C-alpha cells in the first residue's frame, strides 16, 4: 500500500533532472541575450567612455582594458583608487566597433520644442529646491545634536557656560543659515542604453566623433594585430611608447614589451632609437618597433593579421 520506493525515487530523480535542464536552458538564454547587447560607448568630445559596469565587464572579457578616470563618491579627494567612467583608447573603441561589439551613443540634437525644454528646467529647479530644504533640515538637526552634546558635557563639569550654550540652542531655529554653496547635488550618470530603446539599438553604423588620420590608422593596425595574437595592451605614455604589451591580463602579468608604432616610410632619428632602447632596458622591457605594411605591398585594401613588421630593440652597452 505504501508504494514502490524505487519507483518513487526514479520519478523524483527524473523531475529534478527536468528542473535542472529548465534552469540550464534559462541561464543559457539569459547569457545569450546579454551577449547580444551592444556595448554603449559615450563620448566626451573625441574621448570614448564607458559608464555601465556590465559594459566594462564585457570589454574586459574581450581583452579591452581601458583606464578608470572617475572619482569615488565616498572618497572624492584622492586619486589612488578611481571609479567610473572607464576611458578607452581610441584604438580600443575602434576595435570594438569593427568587431560589431559596441556602438556609439551620440547625444540627440535639440528637438526645438521650447515648451518641453522649459518644463524639464522647471522640474529640475523644483527638485533642487526640495533637496535644499531637506538638507537644511538635516544640517540643523546635526548642529543641534552637537550643541546638546557640548551642553551635557558642560553641565556635568564645573564650568558655568552651559546656560550660554542652552540659550544658543534655543535661538538656533531662527539664527541657523545653511549656505547653498554647501549643498550636495546628485549627478545622474546612469543611462538606459541600447537595450531600453529599440530604435537606438538599430543605430549601429555611425560617424564616430574621433579624428581619423594616418597616425591613428597606424596605431590601430598595430593594436588590432597584437590583440588578434592574444596580447593585452594599455597606454605606454609614461614609458615613451604607444602601448604596453602584456602576455595576459594586466592584473596577473607584467608587461614584456613597449610598442612604438611608426609607419614604413617614417624616418626616426638615431637619438630617439637609443633613448627608447635605453629606457626599455632600465624598466626591464623589450622595445618593439611596429610598422604596418602599406596597402601596395600587401595587395589588399585593408590590413589583416600578419601585415605588421616587428623589430625588437635591446640596449647592451655604450661603445
Image (cartoon, rainbow, N blue to C red):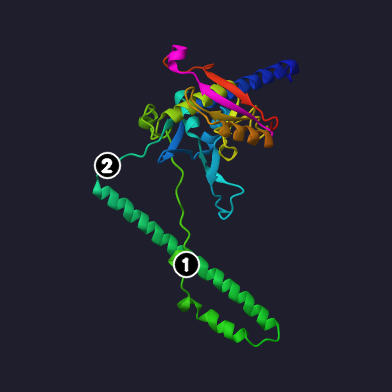
Distance from the alpha carbon under mark 2 to that under mark 1: 37 Å
Residue farthest toward the top in the current orientation of the protein: 299
Query: Which residue is at 45% across, 48% downward?
Result: 188
Residue visible at 57% across and 82% down in the picture? 166
Give above or below for 278 relative to 264. below
Residue at the spot x=46%, y=57% of the render? 185
**Residue 26 visible to the viewer:** no
Q: Are marks 2 and 1 in contact (CB under 8 Å)?
A: no
Q: Position of residue 98 (x, y in %)?
A: 45, 24
Mark 2 surroundings within 10 Å by alpha-carbon count, few (fewer than 14), some (14 through 19), many (20 or more) = few
Residue 151 point in image, percent of width and height: 63, 79
User: Please, what secondary structure does the residue beneath circle 1 have?
Assistant: helix
Q: Secondary structure at mark 2?
A: loop
Residue 284 drawn in magenta: yes
The residue wearing badge 2 is 111
Q: Which residues are magenta?
A: 283-300
Q: 117 or 98: which is nearer to us? A: 98
Q: Earlier in the sequence, mark 2 or mark 1?
A: 2
- Judged left or right of residue 245, residue 9 is right
Asked if residue 122 is positioned above or below residue 25 in the image, the reply reads below
Nearest to the observer: residue 94 or residue 267: 267
Label 1, on which residue? 136
Extreme residue toward the front, this view: 319
Q: Is residue 302 above or below residue 128?
A: above
* Badge nearest the viewer, 2 or 1: 2
Tell me if residue 207 is in the magenta stretch. Answer: no
Q: Nearer the viewer, residue 23 or 180?
A: 180
Amino acid at each position: 500500500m505504501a508504494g514502490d520506493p524505487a519507483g518513487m525515487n526514479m520519478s523524483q530523480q527524473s523531475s529534478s533532472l527536468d528542473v535542472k535542464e529548465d534552469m540550464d536552458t534559462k541561464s543559457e538564454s539569459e547569457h545569450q541575450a546579454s551577449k547580444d547587447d551592444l556595448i554603449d560607448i559615450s563620448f566626451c568630445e573625441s574621448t570614448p567612455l564607458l559608464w555601465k559596469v556590465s559594459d566594462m565587464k564585457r570589454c574586459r572579457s574581450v581583452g579591452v582594458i581601458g583606464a578608470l578616470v572617475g572619482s569615488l563618491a565616498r572618497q572624492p579627494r584622492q586619486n589612488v583608487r578611481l571609479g567610473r567612467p572607464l576611458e578607452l583608447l581610441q584604438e580600443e573603441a575602434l576595435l570594438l566597433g569593427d568587431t560589431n561589439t559596441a556602438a556609439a551613443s551620440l547625444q540627440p540634437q535639440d528637438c526645438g520644442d521650447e515648451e518641453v525644454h522649459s518644463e524639464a528646467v522647471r522640474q529640475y529647479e523644483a527638485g533642487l529646491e526640495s533637496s535644499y530644504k531637506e538638507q537644511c533640515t538635516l544640517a540643523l538637526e546635526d548642529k543641534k545634536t552637537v550643541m546638546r552634546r557640548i551642553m551635557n558635557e558642560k553641565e556635568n563639569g564645573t564650568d558655568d557656560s552651559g546656560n550660554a550654550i542652552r540659550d544658543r540652542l534655543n535661538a538656533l531655529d531662527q539664527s541657523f543659515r545653511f549656505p547653498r554653496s554647501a549643498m550636495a547635488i546628485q549627478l545622474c550618470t546612469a543611462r538606459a542604453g541600447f537595450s531600453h530603446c529599440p530604435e537606438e539599438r538599430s543605430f549601429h553604423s555611425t560617424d564616430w566623433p574621433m579624428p581619423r588620420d594616418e597616425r591613428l590608422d597606424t596605431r590601430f593596425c598595430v593594436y588590432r594585430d597584437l590583440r588578434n595574437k592574444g596580447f593585452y595592451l594599455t597606454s605606454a605614455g609614461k614609458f615613451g611608447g604607444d602601448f604596453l604589451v602584456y602576455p595576459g591580463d594586466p592584473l596577473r602579468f607584467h608587461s614584456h614589451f613597449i610598442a612604438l608604432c611608426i609607419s614604413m616610410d617614417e624616418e626616426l632619428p638615431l637619438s630617439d632609437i637609443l633613448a627608447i632602447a635605453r629606457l626599455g632596458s632600465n624598466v626591464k622591457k623589450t622595445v618593439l618597433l611596429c610598422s604596418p605594411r602599406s596597402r601596395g605591398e600587401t595587395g589588399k585594401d585593408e590590413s589583416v593579421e600578419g601585415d605588421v613588421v616587428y623589430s625588437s630593440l635591446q640596449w647592451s652597452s655604450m661603445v
